[in-house]
Amino acid sequence: MKKHPIQYHALLVLILLGVFTLTACEKDSEESSQSTANVKVGDTVPEFRLNSSDGNEVLSSSLDGRVYILSFFDTRCPDCVEEIQVLQRIYDKYHAVVPVLNVPRSQTKEDVQAYWDEKGLTMPFHTSDDNLYYQFANKTIPRTYVVDDEGKVYAAFNDSPVVDYESLDNILTKIVGEADAKRGPVNLSFKMKVPAASGDPSDYYFHNEYTISRLDIYFFNAATKAFFTKAMITDLTKEESLYDAKYDVTYVFDDVRLRAGVYDIFFVANYDNAPEEPANENELLNMIDSITYNSGIEANLPETGPVMTSNATAFQGVNLIPWINKSYVMNIELERVVAKLQIGVSQNGFQLVHNSKKYAEVNITNYKFVNLNKQYYLFQHKDELSTLTEQPEFLYPKHFYEYKDEGDQYVVDPFFYVKNENTANASAFKNYYHSWFGDFTTEDFASMPSANNYCYAYILENTSFKTFQKNGYSPGIVFKAAVSPVFVYLYDYTNFKLQEEYRPEYWPKTIYLYKHNFYGSLSAINKAGGLTLDELATYTDAQLKAYGIKQINFNMGSYETFYTYWIRHRNIPANPMGPMEYGILRNNYYRMIVVGVNGIGDSKITPDCMRDNYPNSYEDIVVD
């Protein structure tokens, strides 16, 4: 074998390194930069077709009338890597207005995707079936073009030097403003859908759920997020629909006239506190209302209709282009800031049976909501977190997620962040609630309708961090029930034995359930179970629970007991709620029907809001 001298190996390594460098990041000199560019400032951009990493196809013709960025790169090129970070910042600010098209010069889609995943980049990248790069330049990267609304190159950049964020930001602010200024006015017409969801709209009881008496429309500059103008509509017309109207009600109205451009648009219905000129989007998005629905619950909605809003992410970067002789039609869907709850029982009495033998009947007679918020965000907020941190500012798009069952994403009510592990005593935020569970009283109960009839209520959103769900932070219902034993064992002190008493008028004011039998005294339980309870002492529910005993007190004509149910979503595979299993979400429709009881509830509600799953009666009532 022929041996090469050491110097030869060193030379070979240098040659290979030089080849890699040319492949990864080829440099322009000031003298040669123009000679390597086929497309220069002022030139019309050639036609192209791209495939986006988010699954969309982009045609150059689809970008007519828009400002956009076209950038060629290689992830192995240090200058390209530097510029990619700049373009990510530009994308974060301008993506609703200015498309950012990132095209690898020669890398495979798989290689680029791996780099995107590693760096956590959110902007898409684009590939081309043909070698698009060589229509623009001969060899050098990075190479970036800013294209104006007429399809011409407004600015071009390479590595001499790599473009910085401030320079690109200033160019885009100027060129987007110039493009907007050239546009004429546009007329808008609207078709607005409001979910009825609760029943036939011809039923008068439900009609206010979708009534719209006033609509405020806010327009913000999509690039700067600054307020542009506001329109207020009070003359809305219901459209006769061909489909089943019990699911949707459609309003139509026109014309709103404003300058053509790219806008972020927000819709607010029936809102008495709507600001006239918010400074920017975040001022509107962060608004919290404490006047409407301040009791936390409404038995009936006002004649003017409930407060409704559009989804905060639904109308971002809307490109309003003038149409000849007709209006630009927008389709809108609104959501209510309140949720609706339907409550009922499947039968008027539930039998308690043991070993095929009935020992009591329980009749759910009353109910009371607890832990109802008294404030709400005008627009629904969502946050993603694994631990509770200081409350963030709510910025679009970071805190307006579309719900996914991935990670810990939470719908956030105004008090979400105060319900956390730093709260030693839940009473610190009790003033945020109407009917706070920690101040529970047996007053203000509503009557439960008879079987197959339902009562309705509208309440505000209440959510909490997963660790603190179902323990007094979440919204719930306390049910009051009347208990009718078949008989009660009384202790015969003369003959020192137990006797069955079927006549309620002879039962004492407090009775006890022990091993599926009722007893009129602790003496009777001691006799039956061989226990040694102090017959003169007063025991709490928690103390008696240690012995497997429940006590029931007579009040207002019946033996009453209480069951507490923390409202939860049915966590079905088709619609998993993940960390939001317990809580109330706006615009949702909750149907809760008591279909059974597994035992006797508590004689009193003694809330301990810092202990999970208290009271134990949560497990004793079955709600479908």
Image: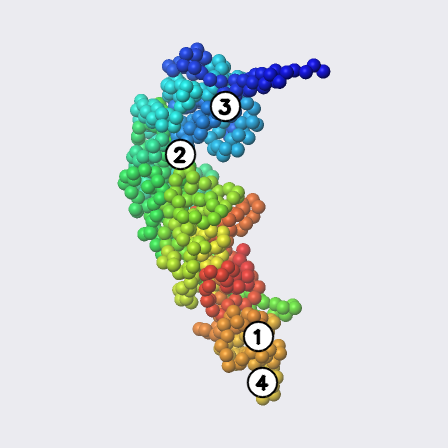
Q: Look at mark 2 in the image and give the residue it sits on.
A: 316
| Point 36% across, 32% down: residue | 222
| Point 37% across, 56% down: residue | 432
Residue 49, image x, y percentages? 50, 20
What distance separates the C-alpha of mark 3 from that of mark 1?
82 Å
Nearest to viewer (mark 2 / mark 1): 2
Q: In the rendered structure, which amino acid carries the disc numbered 3?
A: Cys
Residue closer to the observer: 569 or 205 = 569
Q: Look at mark 1 in the image and give the residue it sits on.
A: 518
Residue 492's disc number: 4
Labels 1 and 4: the sequence-earlier one? 4
Instruction: Name the element at disc 1.
Output: strand
What distance separates the C-alpha of mark 1 from that of mark 4?
15 Å
Residue 77's disc number: 3
Quadrant the C terminus occupies: bottom right
Residue 540, image x, y percentages? 50, 72
Q: In the rendered structure, which amino acid carries the disc numbered 2?
A: Gln
Labels 3 and 1: the sequence-earlier one? 3
| Cβ–Cβ under 8 Å for marks 3 and 2 | no
Nearest to viewer (mark 3 / mark 4): 3
The residue lying furthest to the bottom in this view is: 494
Q: In the rendered structure, which amino acid carries the disc numbered 4?
A: Asp
What distance separates the C-alpha of mark 2 from that of mark 1?
64 Å
Dot 4 surroundings within 10 Å: few (below 14), some, or many (20 or more)? few
Quadrant the N terminus occupies: top right
